[in-house]
Image (tube, coloured by chain):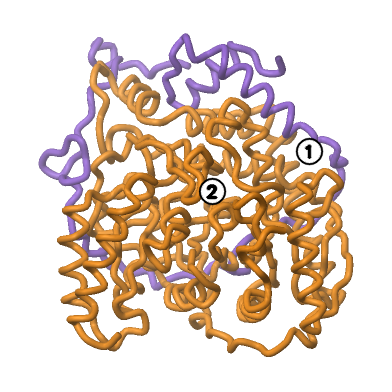
Amino acid sequence: MSVTREEVLRIAQLAELHVEEEQLPALVEQMSRIIDYVAQLSQLPAGETVKPFLAGPDAARFRPDEVKPIPLARPPADMAPAFKEGYFLVPKLEQFEQGNGAAEEE
Amino acid sequence: MTTVAEAVATARATVERLTKVKRLHGLLTPTTELRKSLLQQAQAAHPSGVLYGMPVVVKDNICTLDFTTTCGSKVLEGWRAPYDATAVARLRAAGALIAGKSNCDEFAMGSSTEHSAYGRVLHPLDKTRVPGGSSGGSAALVGAGAVPAALGSETGGSVRQPAAFCGVVGIKPTYGRVSRYGLVAFGSSLDQIGVFGRSVHDAARVLSVISGRDPRDATCEDRDPLRLPTVPESLQGFVIGLPKEYFPAELDPAVRRACDRAIRMMRELGAAVREVSLPHTPYAVPTYYVIAPAEASSNLARYDGVRYGPRFNGATDLRSLYRSTRGQGFGPEVRRRILVGTYVLSSGYYDAYYRRAQQMRALIAQDFRNVFDRGVDLLFTPTVPSPAFKAGEKLADPIAMYMSDIFTVTANLAGLPAISLPIGRVKGLPIGGQLIGQAFLEDEMIEAAYALERVVPATDEA
C-alpha cells in the first residue's frame, strides 16, 4: 500500500473529516490505488518548463471598489443551523471550556 | 407559443410527464411543490421571451430561489438558496419554466449518478443500467421525453457522458462562456454549466440564453451571448481532425462502427477529415484526478456545520462539530475525493502530484492549440468508450469509474467547448459522438453538429 492507515488518519485530520474505524481498510486500499494511478504523472520530467495554463480571461477584471450588498431573498438566519443576534453560533472551543486558553497544538 | 393559457397547459403537461417517469428517480422536487410552482411561473412568465413556456429542469447543484438546492448531499438537505444562479435568472427572463431540480452525484462527483444521497437514477431505456453522471437526472429526464431541455454542470464530462448514455444532446461551453454565479463550486478552474436537449437546436437555444458576460463572476468572459448559427447545407470548408489517441484498439467495436459511420457521413457532407495526434491524452485522467479533488478539498471546506444545512449533533467542541458534520454529511465518494485532494496538496506531496498535474494540464492544452493552429476546425471523437454500464458494476473500483471520463476530461482541462450527440445504438443503448471546438467558437461546433444530426441515423444499430 502506498498510503498507510496513519497517513489516511493524518489527512482526515487536516481535512476536518471524521473517518469511522470500519471505513479505514477500504479507504486505505482505494486511496492507495488512486495515488498509485496518478503517480504516472511523475513520468513528466521535473525540469520541463511549460507556460502555466489558466482557464478563463487572461486578466482578472476588477469591479469598482464599492460596497454593494447583494439583496438575499433569505437572511443568514434561515440558512444557518444556529444563528443569534447577527452571529453564527458554534460550540465553544475545547481549550476555553477547559479554562486554560492555550492554543491547541497539532 | 404566445399565450398564458398555452404556457399553463404546457406547465400541466410537464407535471404529468415528470410524474409518469418518477420511477427513474431523476427529479428531486416533490410533485405537489412542482405543480404549484410551475403553474405560478406559467402565469407570471413574460410571453415575449424567446423560451416562453419551455420547461427546463435544473441540476440540483445550481441555485434556485424556489425548490431546495442539495447537490445530492445530506450536508445540504433542505437548503434553499437565497438567490437564483445567473443562468437560472436568464432562463426565467426568457420565459422558460423551471421544472424542478434533478438528481445528481453528490456535489457532482461521479460518473453514474449512483453517488446521490437521495438514491440512484435509472437509465431511461434500461433500469438495470446507469444514466451516466454526474448530471444523470437531467440526462434521464430529457432522454425519457419528460422535458425538452435541462441544465447540468461539467467538471470532467458530467453533461456529455450522460448525454451519450441517454441518447440526447449535451453541450459543454467554453470555460468563461456561461457565468458560474450560483453554480455550487466543485473544481473552480474546470466547472461550467452545460445544457441538455432533445436536439442540437433545443440545447443551443438554451445555451444562447444563459451565455454572456456577468459582473458577478470574474471568470466569465466579457462577451455577448452566443449567437445561434443557421443549419448548414453541407460541411464544405470544415476540417475535422480525428485524434488517434481517442480511437484505441480496445475501443468497443460498436462504438467504433458508429463513429466510422458518422465520419463517413461528415466526409459525404463535404468535410475534409484527417488524423491528428494529441500526445498527452493518456495523462488526462490522472491529471484531472489530481486537480479536481485538490480544488474540491478547498471548495468543500465551507460545509462545516456552521454556515449551511444540518448540524450533526453530539459535538462537544468546534473541531468535533466540523469533523462529525463533514464525516456524517458527506458520502463515500466525496469523502474519498476530499482526502485525495488534501493528500496531493499536503506538504511533501505538492510538487510530486499537484505541480506535475498543473504542468501536464498546460501540455494537454498545448496539444489542442497545436492541432487547431494547423488548420483543423473541430475534432471528432467518441464521447465515451462504451455504452451505459450496469448499475453497481464500477462502484467498488474508483479507477474503472474514472476511466469512463477518458474522452471528456481533456476539453475541461483545456477549457474548450464540446458537444455530444447521438450517433447510433448498440443493442438498443445509445452511443454518443463528440465534437470538440476552439475556445469561444461554439457557433462553428453547433453548425457542424446541426449538419451531422440531420444525416446520422441516431436510433439505428451501429
In this rendered view, identify the residue nearer to me: B108 or B40: B40
In this rendered view, identify the residue nearer to me: B144 or B84: B144
Question: Could you say where residue B391 lies in the image, as x and y percent from the top left?
Answer: 53, 35
Residue A80, placed above or below residue A11: below
Query: Mark 1 Cα within 10 Å, few/some/many (few <14, many 20+)?
Result: many
Q: CA distance from mark 1 to mark 2?
A: 19 Å
Q: Which quarter of the image is occupied by the C terminus of chain B?
A: bottom right
The residue positioned 64% from the left and 39% from the top of the image is B402
Chain letter of the residue beneath label 1 in the structure image: A
Chain in orange (letter): B
Question: Could you say where residue A83 lies in the image, as x and y percent from the top left?
Answer: 16, 38
Residue B239, placed above or below residue B175: below
The residue positioned 24% from the left and 83% from the top of the image is B46
Q: Which quarter of the image is occupied by the N terminus of chain B?
A: bottom left
Which label is found at residue B226?
none
Residue highlighted by disc 1: A41
Numbered disc 2: secondary structure: loop
Q: Colour of chain A?
A: purple
Residue highlighted by disc 2: B187
In this rendered view, identify the residue nearer to me: B227 or A103: B227
Question: Could you say where residue B62 lies in the image, as x and y percent from the top left?
Answer: 38, 56
